[in-house]
Amino acid sequence: MKYLKIIGMFMLSLVIMGIAQGIAQLFDSLIPFLRDTIFFAFMYVIFAYIAVKFVVTRVLSGVLESYRITLPRFNKIYVILGFMLPIVVYSTYVIFVPGEFLIQKLEFSQDYLRNIFWAIFVNGFAAAIVEEMVCRGLLMGYVEKKTNIYIAVFSSALFFALIHLFNGGLNTISFCMLLISGTLVGLMFGMVTYIFNTIWASITLHFLWNISQLLFISGKASNDQPFQYILHNQSILLTGGEFGIDSSIISTVGYSIVILILLIIHRRKAI
């Protein structure tokens, strides 16, 4: 029965993100300027928060803080880690992987604004808050209460990887790379949330990683990305395949380094 409830919570977490996104999209259609960006991002966060709060307080009779869903707070350690990860990964690409910078000449200036705002507010702000609130807050907290923190961190990490597989269009190699890298990212987010006892630790890492994609690194040019670094080497290990550099070997090594640092921090805190 316990594990059926856990499976149910996994499904509920998926439903919360899907419904919140759908409702936000409906509201967003009422706003003509820069639609699909700022307004959508804030509505997505608000509806997801309402749903998570309802489940925690009404369905589970708990409090948000016990699921590490706290008021915003920041610690210099995870802020530094959040900046370090994209700086190391992107610097490695630019310094060691041959390529060329490209500034795409989009037809209208509003296209630039839309893509930049999308990267900051939707991929950065909204995705980081909602995914961490659901995966590392509600889901990880629930599984931890039913089992233990190890199962909670790993299962929520695997869930995080699997939901990104819904993008589709992945060949076998890309699928495996995304599953591995996505699980490592989930472990990184889960560990930093547990160590610092707040989802704002993982939100910080998630947000800073996502907005770093304002510089689009890929093996081929994109028509809708303003700032790009096009790799000359087309190896799937470097490009990350269909999902992009998030799944590349360079990014995967970056996630692993942060995980090792978090293990050291956790060990020192435990002494």
Image (cartoon, grey):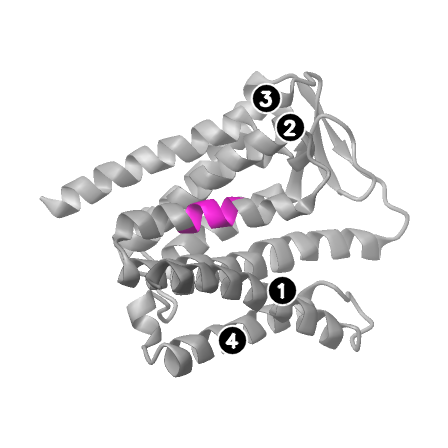
Which quadrant is home to the N terminus? bottom left
Measured in 3D between alpha carbons, the distance from the residue under mark 1 to the one under mark 4, in whole angstroms, is 11 Å
Looking at the image, residue 126 sits to the left or right of residue 101; the answer is left
| Residue type, mark 4 in image | Ala
User: Disc 1, disc 2: CB below 8 Å?
Assistant: no
Residue picked out by circle 3: 237
Which numbered disc flags the more N-terminal residue, 3 or 2?
Answer: 2
Residue picked out by circle 1: 18
Residue picked out by circle 2: 172
Measured in 3D between alpha carbons, the distance from the residue under mark 4 to the one under mark 3, in whole angstroms, is 39 Å
Front in this rendered view, residue 62 or 80: 62
Residue picked out by circle 4: 51
Q: Residue at x 70, y 63 (%)?
A: 37
Q: Is residue 237 above or below residue 116?
A: above
| Residue type, mark 1 in image | Gly
Q: Quadrant of residue 104?
A: top right
User: Disc 2, disc 4: CB below 8 Å?
Assistant: no
